Structure formats: structure tokens, C-alpha cells
Image: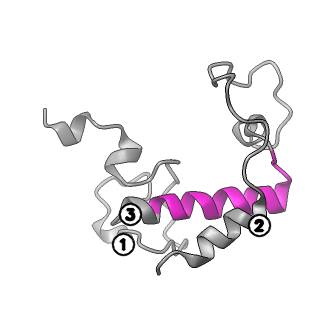
């Protein structure tokens, strides 16, 4: 077993949110589907591009579905109060950076 195979899948794929592979999605910096060795999740050439895709996805969920807390994001907008994972750290900040700050970060990143 190599060090590379011991790493979590999201790190190996440069895809920290484990974004599912959908051939019609055109993420910047992604590995083309025909060269994707994972088959189930997107792979990115660079960790920065995987983080950028994660930020774009989170902002889209915030804008379209008003998922403005981690609890709502984990639940996917569904009201799952008893089954929402309890393993999330209690020390998470109550408010993240504003959506406009996140948008400016995503739009200023290199293509």
C-alpha cells in the first residue's frame, strides 16, 4: 500500500467535498471524464481548483436553496433533525464569511 492510496479519496482526487462525477458539469481544472481514474467522483488537476469548485457549489446552494448553516448543508435542505450527524465539532463559528466575500474569492482565482 502506497502513501497515495492511504490518503482519503477526496484528497487523492483534489476534491475535498467529494463532488460526484457528472460529465455535463464543466468544472475548471477538472480531469476529463475519459481520464478520470475514480469513476464516481470528480478529479481535479490541482487542489486549488477542487477548493474553487467546492466554493462555487456551496455558494450555489446558499443562493438557490438558502442553506446558510452547516446543519442545513449537511441535511441538504431537508428537515432531518434527529438524523443530522452529531459528530460535527461544536466549535464551528456561528457565521462564516459573507457570501459576497466568498464570491469575490471565487471570481478572482486564476482560470
Q: Earlier in the sequence, mark 3 or mark 2?
A: 3
* Segment colored magenta: 50-68
Front residue of 87/9: it is: 87
> Residue 26's x, y, as percent?
52, 75
Q: Which residue is mark 3?
A: 44
Foreground mark, 3 or 2, reads 2
> Residue 82's x, y, as percent?
80, 18
Q: Which residue is mark 2?
A: 100
Secondary structure category for the residue under label 2: helix
Residue that appears at 63% across and 23% down: 89
Q: Earlier in the sequence, mark 1 or mark 3?
A: 1
Q: Is residue 90 above or below residue 22?
A: above
Q: Which residue is mark 1?
A: 32
Foreground mark, 1 or 3, reads 3
Residue that appears at 43% across and 51% down: 40
Q: Earlier in the sequence, mark 2 or mark 1?
A: 1
Amino acid at each position: 500500500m502506497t502513501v497515495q492510496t492511504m490518503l482519503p479519496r477526496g484528497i487523492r482526487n483534489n476534491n475535498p467535498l467529494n463532488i460526484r462525477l457528472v460529465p455535463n458539469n464543466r468544472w475548471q481544472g477538472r480531469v476529463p471524464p475519459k481520464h478520470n481514474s475514480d469513476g464516481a467522483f470528480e478529479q481535479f488537476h490541482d487542489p486549488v481548483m477542487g477548493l474553487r469548485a467546492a466554493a462555487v457549489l456551496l455558494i450555489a446552494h446558499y443562493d438557490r436553496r438558502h442553506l446558510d448553516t452547516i446543519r442545513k448543508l449537511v441535511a441538504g435542505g431537508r428537515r432531518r433533525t434527529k438524523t443530522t450527524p452529531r459528530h460535527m465539532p461544536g466549535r464551528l463559528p456561528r457565521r462564516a464569511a459573507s457570501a459576497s466575500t466568498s464570491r469575490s474569492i471565487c471570481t478572482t482565482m486564476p482560470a
